[in-house]
Amino acid sequence: MRHLKILDLVSEKESMECSLSEAQQHVSQLEMVRSHLKGQVHTIMQIKEVMQENVKGLENQVEEWRSYKKQELADLDQELQSIEELSHITHRILEYAREEALQEKDREKTALFERLLQTQQQLEQLRQEMKEE
């Protein structure tokens, strides 16, 4: 009986050693998976950092582009205002020149009309003098 008990204990010991060996192999495999996953996590973290840096760089580029376009728009607005002001001034100058030209034509017309009257008066006077002779 004692012999059976020893055999049972030996069998149980062998079974436990076998289970321990399997558990150790399993732990070893899990350690390898863990190590592999740690490497992947490290790689992913590096990729994440690079991507965050890239995003920051792109955000900076977008902000610089927005700022540039905003300044470009402000410059175009200023240029448009200058052109509109110049157009308004040119229009006023042209209007003034047209008025001056019309007034000059009126003065010339008046002077010609006065000359015509004088010439008609002189002609009439000459006719009178010729009749008297």
Image (cartoon, rainbow, N blue to C red):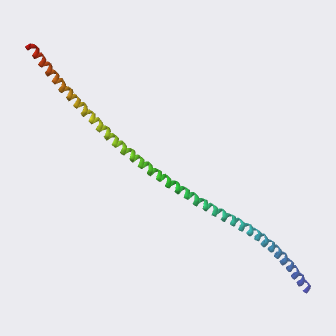
Name the residue at the front extreme. 133
What residue lies at 52% left-to-right and 56% top-to-bottom? 64
Q: Position of residue 92 (x, y in %)?
A: 31, 41
Q: Nearer the viewer, residue 79 or 12?
A: 79
Q: Position of residue 54 (x, y in %)?
A: 61, 59
Q: Position of residue 73 (x, y in %)?
A: 45, 50
Q: Count up the numbered dots.
A: 0
Name the residue at the bottom extreme. 2
**Which quadrant is home to the C terminus?**
top left
Q: Nearer the viewer, residue 119 or 99?
A: 119
Residue 17 shows in the view: yes
**Which quadrant is home to the N terminus?**
bottom right
What residue lies at 17% left-to-right and 22% top-to-bottom? 119
Name the residue at the right extreme. 3
Q: For residue 36, what is the image quadrant?
A: bottom right
Q: Position of residue 69 (x, y in %)?
A: 49, 52
What residue lies at 37% left-to-right and 44% top-to-bottom? 86
Residue 1 shows in the view: no
Q: In the rendered view, would you say 78 is above or below 41?
A: above
Q: For residue 106, what is the image quadrant?
A: top left
Q: Is 86 placed left or right of 48 in the picture?
A: left
Q: Is 13 placed left or right of 44 in the picture?
A: right
Q: Nearer the viewer, residue 16 or 21?
A: 21
What residue lies at 71% left-to-right and 65% top-to-bottom? 40
Q: Is 3 placed left or right of 90 in the picture?
A: right
Q: For residue 29, what is the image quadrant?
A: bottom right
Name the residue at the left extreme. 132
